[in-house]
Image (cartoon, helix red, strand yellow):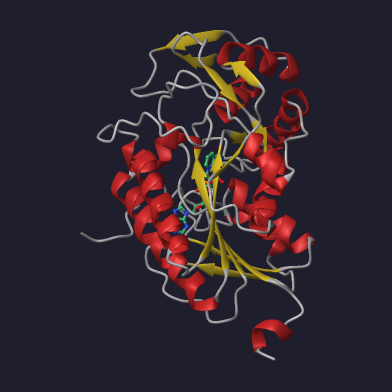
Amino acid sequence: MTMHTIRDKKTSVVAGGAGFVGSHLCDALLAKGHRVICVDSYLTGRAENIIALENHPHFRMIEADICNIQMIDEPVDQVFNLACAASPPHYQADPIHTMMTCVQGTANLLSIAAQHHASFVQASTSEIYGDPEEHPQREDYRGNVNCTGPRACYDEGKRAAEALCFDMFRSGKVDTRVARIFNTYGPRMRPDDGRIISNLLVQALKGEPLTIYGSGNQTRSFCYVKDLVTGLISLMEVQPNPGLPVNLGNPSEFTINELADLVLELTRSRSELVYKPLPMDDPQRRRPDIVRAQTLLEWEPTIPLEDGLRMAADWFALALRNDLPTRSRNGSSQVGSTVLQF
Ligand SMILES: NC(=O)c1ccc[n+]([C@@H]2O[C@H](COP(=O)([O-])OP(=O)(O)OC[C@H]3O[C@@H](n4cnc5c(N)ncnc54)[C@H](O)[C@@H]3O)[C@@H](O)[C@H]2O)c1
């Protein structure tokens, strides 16, 4: 019997595990009895997100950039690749590094998965559909991405990462699975994250005007982080491998104006709405078709926006009181720091 099969615990690598989604995934995998190895550079993640895990006997932190990592020095069964700045201001702060994280970083992690015969889940994104011309977005829609615009480092990087994953799958080298994640929110988002839910909640809680970009009639579909994490784990475990990308998101669609009204109601804020021009290439409509996830994973979100927003608002209120937002491991925001040398 090999070392691999006699180990009593599955070992999961979570790249990006100090981030918003990744830290919840680490929690969920440890709760399932896995050993968890978190790989993170703290680019946008925060030590606070995983502080409760530091002394957990089955948790290990490796501080590294996935663009540089070559190996993991212990057996591994699963690799979840969530490492990538996800909000536009953060991924645009150093677009070359974002692209290289998606391509070189994903290639490195795929190679590690191949070395260990581990299964692999790639956190892809609804952004690969760009500003969609089809609605809702099904996985067979090929998207409408501006490949030279300011969002391309992320959108095209994630598309290239998907291509790498499917080539590794077709060539029989790695058991890869691809999740196309739609807007997700919840506790541990950075209040300075720049995404719509964190922006509106923080502004409402501080009594500042709520910034709406565009008319506010553009739509998004918001998934609570706990639902997403359940979907990511189901995708990793489902047999046989779907061999196809799977949308994970909440199909309930809201306009940004509706979201702002709900935020004001839940936080009892009297902030006003201020309208600003829409950023370039900002999508008008977003809603996942989740039939594939429902059929193959028997997964669908269970937490309505109102309940999830209340939990997120409670967390943001606490984070603002404790000044949690911008501290990374060394006490300063690292967003925009280039790791690769050209
Ligand atoms: N949250 C969403 O709404 C959403 C939607 C679609 C896709 N995703 C994807 O899910 C993943 C997690 O997103 P999130 O919202 O938790 O973002 P996040 O910024 O909170 O987490 C990303 C984590 O990856 C780390 N990281 C970034 N680049 C790295 C690198 N080169 N090497 C090592 N670590 C690195 C960051 O420090 C951070 O801890 C991302 O890949 C993102 O593209 C998220």
Residue 244 at x, y percent in the picture: 53, 48
| Quadrant showing the C terminus | bottom left
Give the vertical position of 30 relative to 70 (above or below): above
Name the residue located 35 percent from the left edge and 31 percent from the top edge. Answer: 145
Quarter location, residue 56:
bottom right
Image: 284 above or below 315: above
Residue 201 relative to residue 314: left or right: left
The location of residue 95, given as percent across then percent down, is: 31, 44
Q: How many marks?
A: 0
Q: Nearer the viewer, residue 30 or 252?
A: 252
Q: Nearer the viewer, residue 23 or 52?
A: 23
Please identify the residue farthest to the left as the structure is shown.
342
Query: Residue at left 74%, top 19%?
Result: 266
Vertical relation: 267 (above or below) 34: above
**Percent x, y of residue 270:** 66, 9
> Is 323 rendered above or below residue 204?
below
- Evaluate whether residue 128 shows in this view: yes
Q: Is residue 207 visible?
A: no
Q: Position of residue 159 (x, y in %)?
A: 39, 45
**Quadrant of the image occupied by residue 181:** top right
- Residue 82 versus residue 181: which sits nearer the camera? 181
Q: Quadrant of the N terminus?
A: bottom right
Residue 322's image quarter? top right
The residue positioned 46% from the left and 9% from the top of the image is 275
Q: Residue at x 29, y 49 (%)?
A: 96
